[in-house]
Amino acid sequence: MRQAIRRFHDPCRAQNLLNVHRRVAQAVVVRSSEAGCSAAADATTSSTADDTFATAASTAAAPPETHTFEGVQITILRRHSATMPDELTVDDVKAMLDDGGFEGNLESITFVNEASQLPQNPHERILLLDVVRVLFNSAGADGGETIGASDLGEWIARHRLDGATELVDAATEIAQAGRRITFDDFKALLTRSKLLSFQRERGTDGYGVHPSLVRTTAGVFFQHADSNHDEKVSREGLARMFKAHGLGDAARAERYFERFDLDKSGELDKKEFTRLLLGLKMIDGDGTDKLTKEDQSACVIL
């Protein structure tokens, strides 16, 4: 029997929910009180009678298409593809949110035409796109805009993802067409092949990540918590991570720190920190604090 979907109001989770969809290139979801963040200092603010918050990078850009409701504000850059000719609509977005369990109020949905028109992301926690960007860079992008089919093939082999047939088939098709792979293409490949997926049936706020990608994913969290970049996570850094991700107060963070500071050095190294993520079930394969080869997916709470 299908489990009931957990309902939520969190704009961070709503943002992740939208960003995992293959028809969304990028979405930013903010509370009304956070909507003052614009995409760039020299951006032109487009104001209407509904007092929307969409921004335009230049007068040459097409004006954002805004639909006003009440509550959180959503800005979406649509992903365009020959296999998805229909434009993403307001009803599509509302259906995505409802199916995923979002029950907050919507103040506006704005569709923009360029990434520069998106507002700044105000969220402090690690988000889905942060993880995808690191995986994309590890496939050879290195901060660039595209990777080649050969880069993707090597990445598949390096992570032993040969069994992900849909991903392998897509890489073969791209190679035959002589195309290069954009960040949006890469995100769509990960979600379509279920290497990265929204885990509604788990009854938790998380995404499934293939076990071979868990170490890289844990590294994203580690770099975020390692605020002074010394390859160690302090008590203060862990407490900040707990607060940002709604994992508990400083006292709970301290208990986990003491439990996983195995060498009692007063700091967490990468190995200890990864074990802590497993113990928290931020990364979870088989219900233990270790990942095994038999694990088919792991849950990363973003």
Image: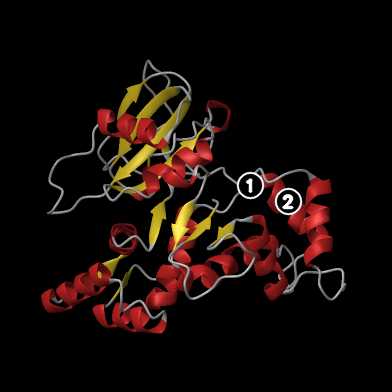
Q: Which mark is residue 55?
A: none
Q: Is residue 54 above or below residue 287?
A: above
Q: Mark 1 packing: few (<14 Cα in 10 Å), some, or many (20+)?
A: some
Amino acid at the residue labelled 1: His
Location of residue 238 in the rendering, given as x and y in whole percent from the top left corner: 75, 57
Amino acid at the residue labelled 2: Arg
Q: Mark 2 packing: few (<14 Cα in 10 Å), some, or many (20+)?
A: many
Q: Earlier in the sequence, mark 2 or mark 1?
A: 2
Instruction: Identify the residue position indicated by label 1 in the image.
Output: 245
Q: Secondary structure at mark 1?
A: loop
User: Can residue 194 be seen?
Assistant: yes
Discs 2/1, front: 1
**Coloring basis for residues:** secondary structure
Left or right side of 283 for 243? right
Q: In which quarter of the view is residue 74 placed?
A: top left
Q: Residue at x 71, y 70 (%)?
A: 229
Quadrant location of the N terminus in the rendered image: top left
Q: Is residue 284 above or below residue 10?
A: below
Location of residue 199 in the rendering, given as x and y in whole percent from the top left corner: 43, 49
Q: Is residue 257 above or below residue 62?
A: below
Pick whichever, 27 or 92, lies toward us: 92
Q: Residue at x 49, y 34 (%)?
A: 6
Location of residue 178 in the rendering, given as x and y in whole percent from the top left corner: 15, 77
Left or right side of 47 for 214? right
User: Can residue 55 be seen?
Assistant: no
Q: Residue at x 78, y 52 (%)?
A: 253
Tell me how far mark 2 sits from mark 1, CA to CA.
9 Å
Instruction: Identify the residue position indicated by label 2 in the image.
Output: 240
Q: In which quarter of the view is residue 57 placed?
A: top left
